[in-house]
Amino acid sequence: MGSSPGSIYTLTELRENVVTWRANGEQIGLVPTMGALHDGHLSLVQRAISECDRVVVTIFVNPKQFGPTEDLETYPRDNKSDLQKLAAFDTALAYIPDATKMYGPGFSTRVEVDGLTEHLCGKLRPNFFSGVATIVTKLLIQSLPDRAYFGDKDFQQLLVIRRLATDLDISVDIIGCPVIREPDGLAFSSRNAYLSTRDRITAPALFKILQQTAERAKAGEPCRAAEAWAKNELIQRGFTKVEYVDIRREETLESLDMINERSPRARVFGAAYLGTTRLIDNVTATSHG
Ligand code: PAF
């Protein structure tokens, strides 16, 4: 293990490090983030450090994954605090590229993953997954990691990234890591910072209602009925708008009608608004081990 490498801002510096590490036979881990680091991100860094010799943590608010009416301008940014948090991890190198360099003049390539992106968040945020797929592909090519780490909270994103790595023959293990939650069950997210005091109290209901939905479906309630119950319950609890509560097959995101011992692995996915803050979460809904 080396000493603290700190932070870098250019692709040239990243490549110099990567060339040296690979020449030394060191294993590289990549943790892509948009900054505003919280315990969920830090758990990914911790896991990467436990499995790799060197870890690149990218901090880049990717403009290509925001829609025209979304929160690109207001997305929380605090590089100073992020770097302080990363200082605790002595083999983590923060890579903080500039958007004008990442997407230089004439940039016109997009990575599109079909199928998986037609459901859930893909339906409601048309450019989101191609924006994510494009930046993650670039980051994988730039840092040549052995492993790259993503949270299960963004489960659909994880599946999309696995798909693109397989389809584009990118030699990397894409590792999904468990959702990290506040003591009251709210999944850590940089966007939780937008919640008012009142909405912060309501927010953990999303997780609890998804859990109850999973239990209802596992007990034999038809999936459509369990989903309808959940949507109504979220509104009763104070959510402003429910985008979806969907029980789907874990591997392919296909819709399921019922859950039983013969069903493939399943998850309940939810997206709902508290005021203007959009929260997403998901829980397992598998009735067997
Ligand atoms: O999950 C995120 O924070 C982003 O979508 C990611 C993977 C860093 C790509 O910008």
Image (cartoon, helix red, strand yellow):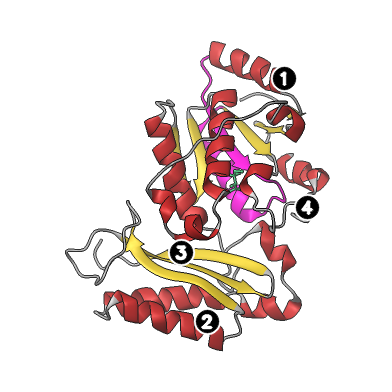
Q: How far from the left and from the top, in percent, is residue 42?
A: 63, 48
Q: Earlier in the sequence, mark 1 or mark 3?
A: 1
Q: Nearer the viewer, mark 2 or mark 3?
A: 2
Tags 4 and 3 touching, CB below 8 Å = no
Q: Nearer the viewer, mark 4 or mark 3?
A: 4
Q: Nearer the viewer, mark 1 or mark 2?
A: 2
Tags 1 and 2 touching, CB below 8 Å = no
Q: Nearer the viewer, residue 282 or 98?
A: 98
The secondary element bearing badge 3 is classed as strand
Q: Amino acid at mark 1?
A: Glu
Q: Nearer the viewer, mark 4 or mark 1?
A: 4
Tags 2 and 3 touching, CB below 8 Å = no
Alpha-carbon span between mark 2 and mark 3: 14 Å
The disc placed on residue 73 is 4
Q: Earlier in the sequence, mark 1 or mark 2?
A: 1
Q: Hey, which residue is sitting farthest bottom in the picture? A: 236
Q: Amino acid at mark 2?
A: Leu
Q: Amino acid at mark 3?
A: Asn
The disc placed on residue 282 is 3
For disc 2, the marked residue is 234
* Left or right, 178 with reference to 13: left
Q: Residue at x 54, y 64 (%)?
A: 280
Disc 1 crowd, CA 10 A, few/some/many (<14, 14-19, 20+)? few
